[in-house]
Amino acid sequence: MAEIQLKITGMTCEHCVRAATQALRSVPGVQQVEVRLPDSATVVGEVALADLQAALAEEGYQATVR
């Protein structure tokens, strides 16, 4: 299983953390998610970066690999 470290822009509060966490967990292949303020997330699973980015974009966030 791969571990992907993301930098997420646009998060400002705990609501953002919950929204980003739910978005990432909704991606098929994701096994574990940890989102932290102000701008980071760790995702474990067999998943494409583009799928994670697309899920976050639907919530209004942008993500790049750390």
Image (cartoon, rainbow, N blue to C red):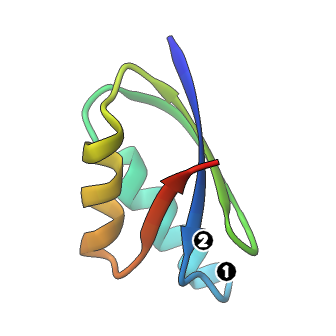
SS at circle 2: helix
Q: Residue at x 35, y 48 (%)?
A: 52
**Residue 48, percent across and down?**
30, 32
Q: Which residue is mark 1?
A: 14
The answer to whether residue 50 is seen in the rendering is yes
Query: Which quarter of the picture shows residue 5?
Result: top right
Q: Which residue is mark 2?
A: 17
Horizontal side of 62 relative to 7 (left or right) equals left
The answer to whether residue 26 is seen in the rendering is no
Disc 1 from disc 2: Cα separation: 5 Å
Horizontal side of 44 relative to 34 (left or right) equals left
**Residue 10, percent across and down?**
54, 84
SS at circle 1: helix
Residue type at numbered disc 1: Glu
**Residue 57, percent across and down?**
30, 70
Query: Which quarter of the picture shows residue 62?
Result: bottom left
- Marks 1 and 2 in Cβ contact (< 8 Å): yes
Taking the view exactly as shown, the residue that stands out farthest to the bottom is 12
Mark number, residue 64: none
Vertical placement of residue 14 versus 53, above or below: below
Taking the view exactly as shown, the residue that stands out farthest to the top is 1
Residue type at numbered disc 2: Val
Q: Neighbour class for label 1 at 10 Å: few (<14), some, many (≥20)?
A: few
